[in-house]
Structures are given as C-alpha cells and as structure tokens.
Image: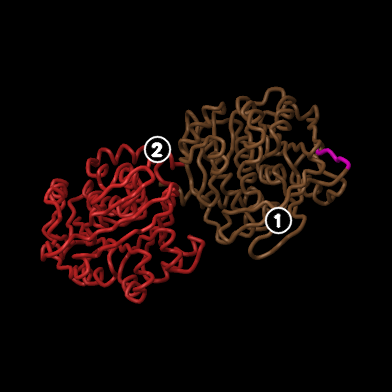
Chain colours: A red, B brown
Amino acid sequence: MSLLVIGTLAYDTIETQAEKRVDVLGGSAMFFSVAAAAFRPVQLVAVVGKDFRPGDLDMLKRRGIDTSGVEHAEGRTFRWSGRYEADWNTRHTIETQLNVFEKFDPKIPAAMRLSKYLFLANASPVVQAKALDQVEHPAFTVLDTMNLWIEIMRPELMALLRRVDGVVLNDEEARMLTGERNLIKAASLVLGMGPRYVILKKGEHGAFLMGNDVHFSLPAYPVKKVVDPTGAGDTFAGGFMGHVAREGNIAPKTLRKAMLYGTVAASYCVEDFGVDALKNTGLGDFDVRYEELLGIVTP
Amino acid sequence: MSLLVIGTLAYDTIETQAEKRVDVLGGSAMFFSVAAAAFRPVQLVAVVGKDFRPGDLDMLKRRGIDTSGVEHAEGRTFRWSGRYEADWNTRHTIETQLNVFEKFDPKIPAAMRLSKYLFLANASPVVQAKALDQVEHPAFTVLDTMNLWIEIMRPELMALLRRVDGVVLNDEEARMLTGERNLIKAASLVLGMGPRYVILKKGEHGAFLMGNDVHFSLPAYPVKKVVDPTGAGDTFAGGFMGHVAREGNIAPKTLRKAMLYGTVAASYCVEDFGVDALKNTGLGDFDVRYEELLGIVTP
C-alpha cells in the first residue's frame, strides 16, 4: 500500500564526544523515508532551499523515494545543530534555523492524496494539520511531535491528536504531554487524547506499543558502538510504517513485527552520522538483524 | 532440586518521597528466599541478632523455608537505611550497620551441603567464598554483589567470579566492574572473568541474560505504582533461581522462562515496603503475571 510522509529535510551540525560534523544530511522526513523505502516505495512531501545538494536528492530517488512533492524554495534549507553528552541520553540543541521551513505551506501532489498510509513526521502541528487536510481517505495515520510543539502549540497538537490513529513519542515527550512520570500511565493518558495506538520510544531502553487490542514491549537492538543517535526515532517510525504499509493491515501481529523492524532500522541509523549507515542498508540487512532480535526477545 | 541461599537478613529504614518506614524486614537472602520459596523449598543460611522478631522467622517457615541454618548471634541484626529520589533510580545510603554480620562466619548445616542450586546473595566476597567452600558439588552457583565490594574487595571478588556459573549485576555494578559504559560490552567482559552466564538488571528498563549459548532480553513488568524498590534485584534472583531449581536444568529455554519469573517476582516486591507484598504471593499469582508478561513480550 502507498506510504506518504511529510516532514523536514535538513542539514544538521552534530557534536559528539568523539567528533564534530557540519551539514550532515538529516531531518525527520529524511530519516523516515530512507528507512521506510527498504519496504515500500515512499512518497515524500517537504521543502528545501536553493542550497540543497542535488546528490542528496539523487540518493533518495535511487532508494525508490518519490521526491516530486519536495518543494524547492528561495532561501536556505532547515538547519539544526546539537551536542551529545557522553551518555548519549542528554542532547543539547545549540541552534535551530527554520529557514525555508518557516513559511512552508505543504502542497501534496494530486497523485499522492490517495495514499493509505500517512506519517506526519515531526513538524509544527499547523503544518501537519494542513497536510492531513489534503489526504483523502488515509487508512492509518501516525503522528510524531517534539517538546517544542507540546510547549508552544498544545491546543493545535491536542486537536491533531483527535484526528490520527497513532502517535509516536519519546519518554520525555510523553511525560511533558501528560504530566505523568510512569510511562505506562502516561501512555494510557495519551490514548485518552484520541489516538488508538501510542508508540513510546525509550532510546537505548527499547520501546513499547500500547492500544486497546495490543500491548507489546521490546528492548533495543544491542548496538555495540553508537556514533550518532540523531534521527533514531524518525528511523524507528520509518521501519515501523514501512512494514505496516508492506503488510497492508494493522493486525496486532503486524504491529508487533513492525516494532521489531523499527528497532532494527534505528540500530543501523545510530551506527554512523546522519543517514550514512542507513542509506546503504537494504531489506536483506534489516532481515538479518530482525532474525537476530527475534532470537533475543522470544521467550 | 534443592536450593540453598546464603546472605543477609536485615531491618531496613526506608524513606521514599511519600513515606518513611523504620525496621522493615529485608536483607538480600530475605527477599531471595521469600520469592524462590514460591517454586521450591529453600534452605537459608544467615545470621540474625537477639532483636530479630520471632514472627519474622515464623513467616519464613510458613513459606516452606528451612531456617535451621540461621544463626542467632549476640548483638543486633544487620541494619541498612536509605532514601529514594522521586525518580526511584537514585538511591542514597544513609547508614549501614553491619552489627552481627561483621563477624559472620557461615556454617552450612551438613544436610544442606549437598544442595545442587546455590545462590550467594549479596554479602562480602570473603563470606561468600567461605560458604561456597562448604557446598560439596553444586550444579549451578550464582553470585550477587554490590558496588562496595567491587571497590574495596576486588581481588577477592575476581577470585570468586572464577568459581561460579553465573553472576547477577545491575547496570551500575557492571559498569564499575568492567569500566565499560555499553552494557552489552560490559556483559561480554564479565563473561571473560569466569562465569558462563551474566544477568544484567536495569531496574525499570528490564534485564538481560547473556551466555555462550543464550542471549535473552526483556522489559520490566509494567508496574502501575512503585511503593518501595528495595530488594527488587534480590527478588528477581529468587524468582529466577526458584524456577531453575524447579525445572532442574539450565537449558536456554529454562533460563529464558526463569528471566520472566524473576521479572514477575520483582514486580510484586516493589508494590509494597520490604517483603510485605511478596510474602502474600503464591505461585498462582506469579503465573498470572507470567502469562501477562508473556503476552507483552512475545513477538
């Protein structure tokens, strides 16, 4: 089934304890689509500036990603810079430059409006709602967000939560959104806000999926060397939605397998900067780690 | 198969954000044996002072725990007091009074020296080694320890690690013992120190088991309300060893199921102070949560 994503394409400047890299290809929709494209052709809606490197678009096309919905606007591409502490869990945002994303008014090409699987990658709830308005009858819509929008656009976000089937949140976002520290209780509270499913990501501690008909929890894939965790959450969502779109259903069994594929996709993401590791992986690589992870988590 | 534990019986003073309790029944061998006794009769070797409440010993006997190896020494029972931060992960030790434990020279009754399953609960490596010396042909010996012994008795601990089959460590202890932050790598390094199996406990983030023939990881049971996490690790070990002793083998399948039972036992432990919740649970209660956890972790 067709899979559509709207979100950011970006150039990130990333400082880890070991290294600093400038203008690394990133953005929520970038990580998502590079991961999801291993499973299904992906339709991508985003905006870039005049400085966006043609080679970066070519990489997406080679991966089977339809980039006809990527708008080329006057100005510079969205930029984010951040620094990680030695434990990887603490991330400091140094600077966010919205650039062309500031005035982004998403236009979904006619051919993409019939997409059945829709991922609203991290962006302002206003932009996300505008995109959702244009998709005619999505079968399964999942939303991502971040602490910034929970803080400054809560009403818009709450309205959007009532319109989607699922939401992905990390532990910090779930706590901020609900005011509840216990993540199981926080997830239950999020389900009361509208979505039928919540995926709660805990970084190196794994993730869980909660819905009325499913509760599934799993640890992270045992990555031996983390190089850059940027985009791991978006990549998780890409692996998850990619598998769901491939299966064409949201049966509990499908969603559980999708959680494993999300975990596996994220494990490749963190092994290099940006999408450097991820862009060279195919479904065969995902399947190898899927089987390995299955062996680790099956009682 | 027979299951023997040696460790501490204690009275703890515990401060949580909600409440302070004085002289709560605790100790490493207490939590272990109360949990393990749900599966198999347990043989307990420990020392208490003249102040140990007879009713507390009666509770152990009613649970099928053989207390004939509990020495009654002159002086006061071991005491520990600590305080938990709101996130439960940060625990401050306020005071440790060794009392009768300071001169504890463990004597294992003749009838217990043929035990096949042995758990060396947290105590000094010197006391643990003395106990191990007296058990004739243990089939499966597992060791617990703590940051204090890693710091002040490393040579004794390293010698002991070469004599046991398995070791249980929490994340902090594994990092301190190996100097490695990545827990997968830390576990591998611990395997290089002698034991065939390492169980790494991550509190609310679950636990994993690593050995040459098995790697199994699982999340914690989704406890809705934590009251007091004291003893959760010892209780995990009790559920784990209880199931292993009941099965009478250490096949990978047995060890995986044992990890679930350890998780379930710990979930009851944290729901009240000391062993207050745990002492009222039977195998039926464990099986209810075992099935529930199985549903949550099975792909």
* x 49%, y 37%: residue: B180
Would you say the magenta stretch is mainly helix, strand or loop? strand
Which residue is found at the position 51% from the left and 52% from the top? B292
Q: Nearer the viewer, residue B82 or B277?
A: B82
For the N terminus of chain A, the quadrant is bottom left
Q: Amino acid at mark 1?
A: Asp
Q: Secondary structure at mark 2?
A: loop
What residue did someone put label 1 on?
B276
Quadrant in the rendering for residue B67: top right
Magenta includes B71? yes
Say left or right for A295 vs A113.
right
Picture disc at residue A224: 2
Residue density around tag 1, few if under 14, some if 14–19, many if 20 or more, within 10 Å? some
Tell me where the magenta segment starts and ends, as one range.
B70-74
B208 or B242: nearer the eye?
B208
Above-or-below relation of B186 to A195: above
Mark 2 against mark 1, which lies toward the viewer? 2
Residue A211 forms part of the magenta stretch: no
* SS at circle 1: loop
Residue type pointed to by label 2:
Lys
Any part of residue B75 in sight: yes
Distance in Å between CA atoms under marks 2 and 1: 40 Å
The residue most toward the top is B136
Where in the figure is residue A90, as x and y percent of width and height? 43, 54
Examine the rendered structure and indicate whether residue A21 appears above or below residue B223.
above
In this picture, residue A293 sits left or right of residue B177: left
